[in-house]
Amino acid sequence: MNTPSTKIQRALVTGGSRGIGFHITEMLIKQGIDVCIAGRNSEHLENAREKLTADDEAKQRRGKVYIVPIDLEKPDAPQKLIQTAGENLGSLDLLVNNAGISLNLPLEKTTIQDWDRVMHINARAPFFLCQEALPWLRKSAAPTIIQIASVVSHAGYELQSAYSASKHALLGFTKAFAKEVQQEDIRIYTLSPGGVATKMIDSVRPDLDQEDLIDPQEIANMIWFLLTHRRNAMIDHITMRRVKKTAWI
């Protein structure tokens, strides 16, 4: 049986040094795709690159890894990041908006500064990264954007009002944007996982049993399925729940 393939050769993954983003990056480079990973912490990015390129036997088959330290809260970050990634990679076929932060506070204790930071990173940055990426994607044979949303893009949980608002905003603008570029065959997918085994979940839901959480690799596998099935059946959105979570809620 032939291994599934994709026309995608160059990708940018935000928040690619840890968690979901790291697993997505690892999956992509194992398939020979060059990837630029972005994050706030230079040390974390360097550590990630070392881990991703540590397998000497596989180096010849793996894609290259570039790193860009950047703070997505800054207004000029999207323009700088897309320009730097495009120059490093030479082109851009795939943008994965994975970077995000959580906030676990009651609404009445959430400050304007808290609100702005969550909205800037989780909603504003992806919005303008998509905008800045368009000229690059229009030159691609398989232009693709993947938005890592959340179960709180649809639901509301106690102590997560600002975080939920930011993820609702991400999903909302993506629905409109997908219609705007549909005729150009720019494929835009959103994934809404709930309860993923990352450091972020520890701060938001410490009550959850780690053994019940979704493995980030499962999300990376789902993304590879989407990338290798670019045919006439289009999947707009995928919701992923913990297997022990009540079905169809």
Image (cartoon, rainbow, N blue to C red):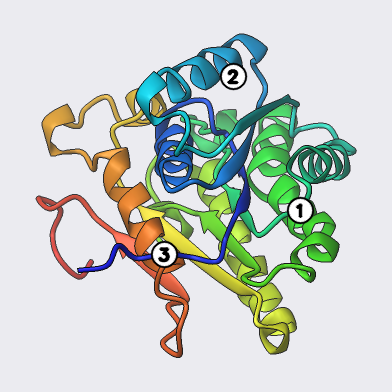
In the visual, does 117 lie left or right of 16? right
Q: Earlier in the sequence, mark 3 or mark 1?
A: 3
The local secondary structure at tag 3 comes to loop
Task: Provide residue 88's location: percent of width, then percent of height.
Answer: 78, 37
- Mark 1 surroundings: few (<14), some (14-19) or many (≥20) residues within 10 A: some
Please state which of residues 130 and 12 is positioned toward the viewer in this rendering.
12
In the visual, does 61 lie left or right of 46? left
Please state which of residues 55 and 19 is positioned toward the viewer in this rendering.
55
Residue at 42%, 36% in the rendered image: 26
The residue under label 2 is 45
Q: Earlier in the sequence, mark 2 or mark 3?
A: 3
Whether 231 is drawn above or below 148: the answer is: below
Q: Which mark is residue 5?
A: 3
In the visual, does 25 lie left or right of 13? left
The residue under label 1 is 91
Residue at 41%, 87% in the rendered image: 233
Whether 103 is drawn above or below 237: the answer is: above
Amino acid type, label 3? Ser
Q: Are marks 2 and 1 in contact (CB under 8 Å)?
A: no
In the rendered image, which quarter contains the N terminus?
bottom left
Q: Quadrant of residue 199?
A: top left
- Mark 3 surroundings: few (<14), some (14-19) or many (≥20) residues within 10 A: few
Q: Quadrant of residue 169?
A: bottom right
